[in-house]
Image: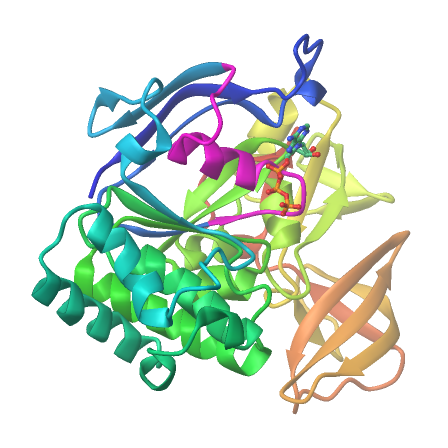
Amino acid sequence: MAEIQLKSLAHSYSKHPSGAEDYAIRQMSHVWHNGGAYALLGPSGCGKSTMLNIISGLLQPSEGEVLFDNVKVNELSPKDRNIAQVFQFPVIYDSMTVYDNLAFPLRNVGMPKAKIKAKVDEIAAILELGEVLHNKARNLTADEKQKVSMGRGLVRDDVSAILFDEPLTVIDPQLKWKLRRKLKQIHEQFNITMVYVTHDQLEASTFADKIAVMYEGQIVQFGTPRELFESPNHTFVGYFIGSPGMNLIPVQRTETGVEFDGLPLHIHPELAKYAETSTSSNIKIGIRPEFVRLSNTPADDSYECHVKYIEDLGTYRIVTLELGSQTLLARIDEDQVIEGDTVHIGFPRQWLKLYIDEFLVEGATE
Ligand SMILES: Nc1ncnc2c1ncn2[C@@H]1O[C@H](COP(=O)(O)OP(=O)(O)OP(=O)(O)O)[C@@H](O)[C@H]1O
């Protein structure tokens, strides 16, 4: 097990990068602590696989250092880094039995036979591969093959870390849930540093204690699922996490705060001060659909808006609203009654976030 530190890391696939857009990883530093269960979450093309391959040594970064327990490993081969990597598609030996596939990484490090058997049996039991243990891998279903592939990563508990690159893509949705739970269970049991790449926020938050959200080659936030939800520190995190994502409204500065379409918005005075002194014209406020307040009658600091439509999603409803030129979403309980096609919307101050140049302005909220 190891702490994995990325120091001023950057990577471009181009030999002569001319600007930030030529970099798959834009200069960044990050620490994956020893024994953590982490997710690396982000949209397609943001650089997740590139980062994993740099950690495992399959790829040499153009700039920066990779350190395991404070020792630079840039020059070490993937084998010498002692990392287990599980890919999107199964990597197994078709002609071998399931047992031999699982035993392979252990035989490679010279583990005694009896210990190999105990370890293989343990992992096979956790992954429910017991019944097919002596079958040839080529005869397995796609799900079973991927379980074997995962098992090959999980069977060694002496590795520096296990990296999972979207390992459940080919797995049946029913089984996905179960396997995620199993991975978590294995993490709890062996306490190995695990980094799990996904573009699915649900997958990330059910597996990981802490999630790194990646956007355009950088980690824009590293936090617990709750921190990402309650206090996204970049507009991308606000938009990407949550269902639906955060309402983000471009606003203009005023003497007392901010406004949009001539409607003054009452933000915390401390935040208003930041907006006032900022030289940027890229100012947004953000509020999650769960935190807007809707009522049928006007209240202090509420705004009348038009109800465009209401979607019933079983246990909750999503209301699409028009306020001036903005479309806003509110997530309300199933039993909240909305009368007619106008409603009054309020933005509780503790949940109203201010973003300048897409980054959260930290400040008092109440
Ligand atoms: N071998 C390569 N050669 C050139 N460009 C590459 C190569 N691999 C990836 N890229 C580019 O680098 C960027 C980051 O890709 P990467 O695969 O790391 O992203 P990702 O977040 O893992 O995406 P996905 O979820 O689609 O796999 C993308 O713009 C991609 O097109």
Is residue 264 visible in the rendered image? The answer is: yes
The scheme the figure's colours follow is rainbow
The x, y position of residue 65, in whole percent, is 37, 18
The x, y position of residue 272, in whole percent, is 60, 35
Q: Nearer the viewer, residue 129 or 6?
A: 129
> Is 123 colored magenta in this rendering?
no
The x, y position of residue 128, in whole percent, is 35, 81
The x, y position of residue 258, in whole percent, is 71, 38
Q: Nearer the viewer, residue 40 or 56?
A: 56
> Is 48 colored magenta in this rendering?
yes
Q: Nearer the viewer, residue 9 or 165?
A: 165
Q: Residue at x 59, y 36 (%)?
A: 47
Q: Residue at x 63, y 42 (%)?
A: 235
Is residue 361 visible in the rendered image? The answer is: no
What residue occupies the far front of the structure in this picture? 95
Q: Quadrant of residue 310?
A: bottom right
Region in magenta: 40-62
Quarter of the image for the N terminus: give it.
Answer: top left
Q: Residue at x 59, y 54 (%)?
A: 199
Q: Residue at x 35, y 75 (%)?
A: 127
Instruction: Please say if 355 is above or below 182.
Output: above
Instruction: Please say if 346 is above or below 275.
Output: below
Indicate which quadrant contains ligand 1.
top right
